[in-house]
Image (tube, rainbow, N blue to C red):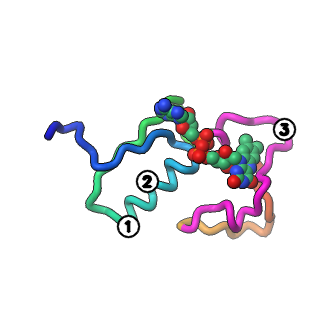
Amino acid sequence: MSNNHVDVLIIGAGLSGIGAACHLTRKSPNRSYAILERRERIGGTWDLFKYPGIRSDSDMFTLGYSFRPWTDPKVLADGP
Ligand SMILES: Cc1cc2nc3c(=O)[nH]c(=O)nc-3n(C[C@H](O)[C@H](O)[C@H](O)COP(=O)(O)OP(=O)(O)OC[C@H]3O[C@@H](n4cnc5c(N)ncnc54)[C@H](O)[C@@H]3O)c2cc1C
């Protein structure tokens, strides 16, 4: 086994990849993983698009991560 071996390889550090990494850390802490992201920044589409007025379509109580529940009174989130 080489030193580069990981149990799980996550492709992409958008919301899905970040969420998968968090779930792995919490629910399977003995499993190693790496995230490969082709851009220099994480966040995926939410980092890529910066146009004025950008916001979520879904309510953040359901779009948000279960491990970081949305507590802001605003139902829709703006870009940042
Ligand atoms: C303005 C806006 C509002 C939205 N609102 C909602 C909403 O309200 N509800 C909803 O469900 N969805 C919404 N979406 C859809 C959005 O796609 C999801 O919210 C979410 O960001 C998807 O995350 P993801 O990680 O699956 O994909 P992405 O954010 O696309 O991330 C994929 C990542 O993988 C990387 N990648 C791809 N291929 C490779 C490769 N071969 N090697 C390495 N890295 C790679 C990319 O660079 C990227 O960082 C919205 C999108 C936008 C732009």
**Quarter-wise, where is residue 60 in the image?**
bottom right
Relative to 17, 56 lies left or right = right
In this picture, which residue range is highlighted in magenta? 45-66
Which mark, by number, is residue 21?
Answer: 2
Q: Tell me the kind of residue under disc 1.
A: Lys
Q: Nearer the viewer, mark 3 or mark 1?
A: 1
Q: Position of residue 42 (x, y in %)?
A: 54, 40
Q: Is residue 52 visible?
A: yes
Q: Position of residue 21 (x, y in %)?
A: 43, 53
Report the quarter where the N terminus lies.
top left
In this rendering, the answer to whether 9 lies above or below 21 is above
Q: Is residue 41 visible?
A: no
The quadrant of the picture showing ligand 1 is top right
Q: What residue would you read off at disc 3?
A: 52
Q: What residue would you read off at disc 1?
A: 27
- Looking at the magenta stretch, what is its main secondary structure? loop
In space, the residues marked 2 and 1 are separated at their CA atoms by 10 Å
Disc 3 CB within 8 Å of nearest ligand 1 atom: no
Q: Tell me the kind of residue under disc 2.
A: Ala
**Quarter-wise, where is residue 28 in the image?**
bottom left
